């Protein structure tokens, strides 16, 4: 077969184009930091990358769920701690008020402080997290108690459980219902004319102090202790769930790190290796250009000689 000058030029152009495309591939890798830019670059790496990205995205969402749940439960624990402090102070005042030798002036002072404790208790019952009432069950847009201490809504303890998914098949309840906290485990209902048992305790406390009934005040000590025991119970439950969330958060953080590392190993280039290959392709390209210049160098005058 006779090799013509046109064939030499066409082969040269095709080879230079191939060298340029290989150099462009390494330049793209260097600029993006990724092994592939389109799935056709490496279908196996692309498929693995999609799977790993999905896994990382899922883990990050679970991690956000856990952090939100922890924040909710931190507010809940803080509110329960405030209730504990209120009940402790109420018990101290009850001991003082039960003393028959307390003067009417002192009894009045105790009454005023108990009224403030009741007001503070109502405020705590209507505590919020990010604009959501934490003790109102599913009705997070409605406060639990009215200003007089009566239930403003109905909350069913065994039904209105706010649950977060923190991993595949792993759910955890994050809320406490108002009845469980303020009604000694009973449901909260706005249809009941009676206030929550804890608020009713303070109502009785205030009424007894108002008439100077020291014996009734002393009888309320057992009721205060009962409510304190109930708060201890729910705080222990919150603490256990909080500890579980912390363990879950630690596990998710490790999984996110490991999967992100795998994703990087699958997608990211080795910069040093890529630069070396790019320089090699640049040298090949420059050499092909130099060789091509020699091939197309002959002119019409060269053929006429």
Image (cartoon, grey):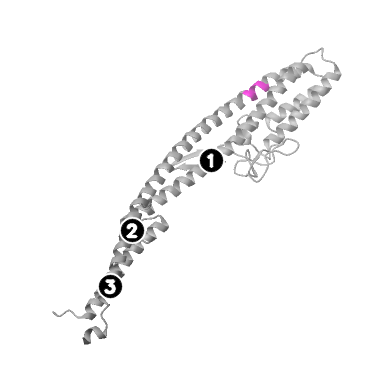
Q: Report helix, strand or loop for mark 3.
A: helix
Percent from the top left, x then y, of residue 148?
76, 36
Q: Is residue 86 above or below residue 250?
A: above
Q: Is residue 137 visible?
A: yes
**Residue 49 vertical placement versus 96 (above, below):** below
Q: Nearer the viewer, residue 29 or 40?
A: 29
Residue at the far left: name it: 1
Residue 242 at x, y = what percent? 53, 33
Which numbered circle lies on residue 89?
Answer: none
Is residue 40 left or right of 304 when viewed as pictured? right
The residue that label 1 is drawn on is 67
Mark 2 and mark 3: Cα distance apart in space: 20 Å
- Assess whether residue 227 is covered by the magenta stretch: yes
Residue nearest the viewer, comparing 287 with 83: 287
Q: Could you tell whether 259 is left or right of 112 in the image?
A: left
Q: Residue at x 67, y 38 (%)?
A: 127
Mark found first going from the N terminus, 1 or 3: 1
Q: Which residues are magenta?
A: 223-228
Which residue is under mark 2?
279
């Amino acid at each position: 077969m006779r090799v013509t000058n046109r064939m030499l030029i066409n082969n040269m152009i095709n080879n230079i184009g191939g060298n340029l495309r290989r150099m462009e591939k390494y330049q793209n890798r260097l600029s993006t930091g990724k092994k592939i830019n389109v799935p056709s670059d490496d279908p196996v790496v692309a498929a693995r990358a999609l799977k790993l990205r999905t896994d990382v995205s899922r883990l990050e969402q679970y991690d956000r769920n856990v952090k939100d749940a922890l924040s909710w439960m931190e507010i809940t624990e803080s509110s329960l701690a405030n209730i504990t402090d209120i009940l402790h102070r109420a018990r101290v005042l009850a001991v003082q008020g039960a003393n028959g030798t307390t003067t009417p002036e002192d009894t009045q002072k105790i009454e005023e402080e108990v009224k403030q404790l009741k007001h503070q208790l109502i405020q705590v019952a209507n505590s919020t997290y990010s604009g959501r009432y934490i003790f109102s069950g599913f009705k997070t847009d409605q406060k639990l108690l009215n200003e007089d201490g009566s239930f403003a809504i109905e909350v069913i303890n065994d039904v209105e459980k706010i649950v977060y998914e923190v991993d595949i098949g792993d759910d955890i309840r994050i809320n406490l219902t108002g009845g469980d906290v303020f009604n000694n485990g009973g449901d909260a209902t706005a249809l009941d004319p009676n206030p929550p048992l804890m608020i009713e305790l303070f109502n009785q406390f205030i009424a007894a102090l108002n008439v100077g009934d020291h014996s009734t005040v002393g009888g309320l000590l057992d009721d205060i202790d009962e409510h304190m025991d109930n708060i201890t119970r729910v705080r222990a439950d919150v603490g256990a769930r909080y500890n579980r969330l912390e363990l879950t958060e630690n596990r998710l953080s490790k999984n996110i790190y490991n999967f992100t590392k795998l994703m990087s190993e699958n997608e990211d280039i080795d910069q040093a290796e890529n630069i070396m290959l790019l320089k090699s392709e640049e040298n090949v390209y420059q050499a092909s250009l130099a060789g091509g210049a020699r091939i197309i160098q002959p002119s019409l005058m060269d053929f006429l000689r």
